[in-house]
Amino acid sequence: GAVVSQHPSWVICKSGTSVKIECRSLDFQATTMFWYRQFPKQSLMLMATSNEGSKATYEQGVEKDKFLINHASLTLSTLTVTSAHPEDSSFYICSARDPLIVTLYGYTFGSGTRLTVV
Amino acid sequence: GDSVTQMEGPVTLSEEAFLTINCTYTATGYPSLFWYVQYPGEGLQLLLKATKADDKGSNKGFEATYRKETTSFHLEKGSVQVSDSAVYFCALRGDTGRRALTFGSGTRLQVQP
């Protein structure tokens, strides 16, 4: 089946620094990548949608200058949390869509990244 | 906007017990409905789906029926196993063109031997 590899699985960083999270589709082409954020005991909230080669579309209330998304190739998308602060501590998870396999496998998710900003 | 509400967990059951995890939704039109499962340390995996009213999705002994009249998509399994312990997410994708999924808050299931 389709696999998305997300790294790192957890990261601790100091306030003010930037953190990059990568998602790679291993055996399919992710024409669309979704980035979600999950707070404890809450739903996964969509942050942004990115299509390969174009700018990401951010959901209302998500700061695009703080959460930089790059989807430069069909197999790699990155989320960079810039100038991180403790309130950015959360669980971030990516989801990839390949229109050729979505009917069979649905949307494929990474394993998530637990970010802790201290 | 679209929303999904599912029962809070954790749900703790003994092996071979019957499982129900409730899920209701709010959406316009005719959304597609999904159940995803997340095992510890892994990504979300599609468990089952239904794309129209009265459809029944099933996989690995789990079932859910798309009930438009009650806007529900409850997950059921007749006999749970310890290996079913995971977090279960109900989700929908609307038919308005937006391709992202809208998730419920997830329900943790713990099955004891």
Image (spheres, rainbow, N blue to C red):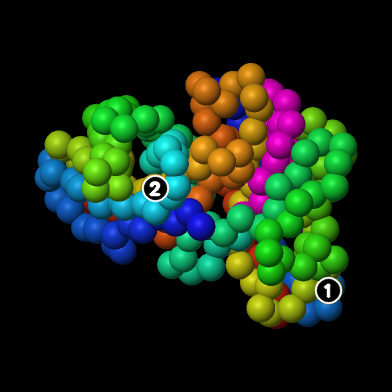
**CA gap, disc 1 and disc 2:** 33 Å
Q: Nearer the viewer's eye, disc 1 or disc 2? A: 2
Q: Residue at x 68, y 79 (%)?
A: A86
Mark 1 sits on what residue?
A83
> What secondary structure is marked by label 2?
strand
- Classify residue A87 as left or right of residue A15: left
> What secondary structure is marked by label 1?
loop
Vertical placement of residue B90 versus B7, above or below:
above
Q: Chain of mark 2?
A: B
Residue A32 is covered by the magenta coloring: yes
Residue A36 drawn at (x, y percent)? 62, 55
The answer to whether marks 1 and 2 sit on the same chain is: no
Residue B20 drawn at (x, y percent)? 20, 48
- Classify residue A39 as left or right of residue B27: right
Magenta stretch, main secondary structure class = strand
In this rendering, does residue B86 appear at all?
yes
Decide: few, some or many residues near mark 2? Use Cα within 10 Å; few <14, some 14-19, many ≥20. many
Q: Nearer the viewer, residue A110 or B8?
A: B8
Region rendered in magenta:
A18-36
Q: Nearer the viewer, residue B105 or A55?
A: A55
Q: Residue at x 79, y 49 (%)?
A: A56
In this rendering, does residue B40 appear at all?
no
Please state which amino acid type lies under the numbered disc 2: Cys
Please state which amino acid type lies under the numbered disc 1: Ser
Residue A100 drawn at (x, y percent)? 64, 19
Decide: few, some or many residues near mark 1? Use Cα within 10 Å; few <14, some 14-19, many ≥20. some
Vertical placement of residue A40 versus B83, above or below:
below
Q: Chain of mark 1?
A: A
